[in-house]
Image (cartoon, rainbow, N blue to C red):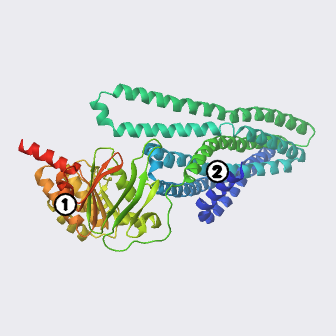
Amino acid sequence: MHQDSRSFYRNVYRRYLRPQRAQLLLLAVLLLLGSLVVLAPAQVLRFYIDAAQQKSVLTTLLVIASLYLVSVIIAMGINVWSTYLSERLSWNATNLLRADLMQHCLDLDMSFHNAHTPGELIERIDGDVTTLANFFSQLMLQVLNNAILLFCTLIFLAAIDWRLGIVFSVFACVTLFAMGKVRNIAIPHWKLARQASALFFGFLEERLNGREDILSSSAIDYVMHCFYHTLQKSYKLERKAGLLGSALGATTIVCFTLGYVMAFSLGTYLYQQGALTLGGVYLLYQYMLLLERPVQQITTQLDELQTASAGLARVRELLETSSVLRECSSGSLPAGPLPITLENVSFRYTPERKALNGISLRVPAGNVLAVMGRTGCGKSTLARLLLRLYDPDEGKILFGSTPIDAVPLQTLRNSVSLVTQDIQFFHASVRDNLTFFNRSIGDETILDVLDQVGLLDWYHSLPDGLDTIVQSSQGLSAGEAQLLAFSRAFLKDPQIVILDEASSRLDPVTEQKIERAVDRLLANRTGIIIAHRLATLERADQVLLLKDGQIEEQGALAALRQRGHSRIAQLFAEQHKEVVA
């Protein structure tokens, strides 16, 4: 194992198990007691056999039988207690690991999320960590327990006869060495199998989300063909990893076949020499069984360790993935509406084509900028840069006199609110959907905002008020969803508002409500509106027309309309002709 791998494993244990060291200590004591108690029944049976052979009185045999029963009950009780404690430790540790992975993924930039589907990340955060939960549980209960049991068994064998101690100690070392040699064979293949499983979950997530398009396009046969192909690939990789992992089991069978031959041969020889009684021979057989149990279970656990190691390697890979966005630990923005400045900003998603090319503009504090252009011209990219979901490849963006990369991301995103056409709702209460689970926002504030956006009647129709559970966007009209998105922005109280205009698809009454909500939301705030209609330009202080990622026109609407060669003027003229016609 490489030095950096060992360091990572140490950090994992230090982060997720050290806080529970008191319970770890208790578990260690229980495991030690459990190992000693497991050995006791065989010793009791040895005395029973020898006493029966010597024709001892019935009372003595009954006492020995009672001791056997007590030792078994104690062993079972310790096993149950240690199992409970081990599971509790492992799930506490892995749940903390899940939380760290979730936080880490949320902190990563959008280029990472564009390269990984949500289904794949679910499998990595939950599926990979679940293998570690099982591993931690088995590690605490099986590997450590069996290692102690193995050591104690060898000690007891040496106590019976020193020759037995030496022979079986050598046997145990050789067996464990052989298993150690073959246990890493399957790790790379299990890693590939886990990756294939993650891709399969990503496939399922994408297809289930697109079920309406699949059904309407009669593409079920094609999707099922891809489903079987993806599943078959995952199956083949897991089968190969499982077959290679079975080398551990084969090694164990061969070693213990030789071990039993050796045990019976030594037992017969020592009995004939008078060094062992009949009870001693039986004890040797029982200890051989006890010796087989820890080694076999360690073998099984090492097999599971191969799967867990692959999962842990993928967890490590995810944790070591860093965001391309440089985070600042300090920095602040002034209060009130913020001026926005872009200085020669360029950005590209792929090396082939720039989404934005040399954009320079300034939006004074409290002004509204309307951004127009064809699909793919860079309107949404501009919004993403202002939220710092990406950093520009060239140039810089400033809020006031402060570059946005000089402000902590949390501070920046608290100051900017984006309202899009596609509204994402959580399976949670209306309150939590509006406040994004911020418990510091009171119900009175929420109701006041709903009143401002014209949703009080809708609120009064809810069966449980703000505690009503939202089932995604089901049961909500497009207008209600849009107004709820505005409510979120009001509750956030940002300094800059970015709106992706969506009123064009609504009925006139709802559109009027949204127009009023927009006016209130933009009051005393700097606004960026991604405009889809010319009517939207009327409320803007400036207009920016983009074409192929570059500025085609820029300026005040009135000035642009007065220019005969202006593209904006031409669009208004064409609209006027259509109205007249």
- In this rendering, would 409 be left or right of 237? left
Q: Which residue is mark 1?
A: 539
Q: Measured along the vertical axis of the image, is residue 199 above or below residue 316?
A: above
Q: Residues within 10 Å of mark 1 (few under 14, many from 20)?
A: some
Q: Nearer the viewer, residue 275 or 194?
A: 194
**Camera-nearest label, 2 or 1:** 1
Q: Residue at x 68, y 53 (%)?
A: 4
- Give how far across and how far down residue 288 sits, in percent: 77, 41
Taking the view exactly as shown, the residue that stands out farthest to the left is: 580
Q: Nearer the viewer, residue 250 or 403?
A: 403
Q: Nearer the viewer, residue 454 or 33?
A: 454
**Does residue 65 appear anywhere in the picture?**
no
Tell me whether circle 2 and circle 1 mark residues in contact (CB < 8 Å): no
- In this rendering, would 136 be left or right of 200? right
- Give how far across and how far down residue 555 sits, in percent: 26, 59
User: What secondary structure is found at the residue carrying circle 1?
Assistant: helix
- In this rendering, would 521 be left or right of 6? left
Taking the view exactly as shown, the residue that stands out farthest to the right is: 273
CA separation, marks 2 and 1? 65 Å
Q: Nearer the viewer, residue 112 or 49?
A: 112
| Amino acid tagged 1 | Arg
For residue 139, which numbered disc appears in the image?
Answer: 2
| Amino acid tagged 2 | Leu
Q: Residues within 10 Å of mark 2 (few under 14, many from 20)?
A: many
Q: Does label 2 or label 1 sit earlier along the sequence? A: 2
**Does residue 234 appear anywhere in the picture?**
yes
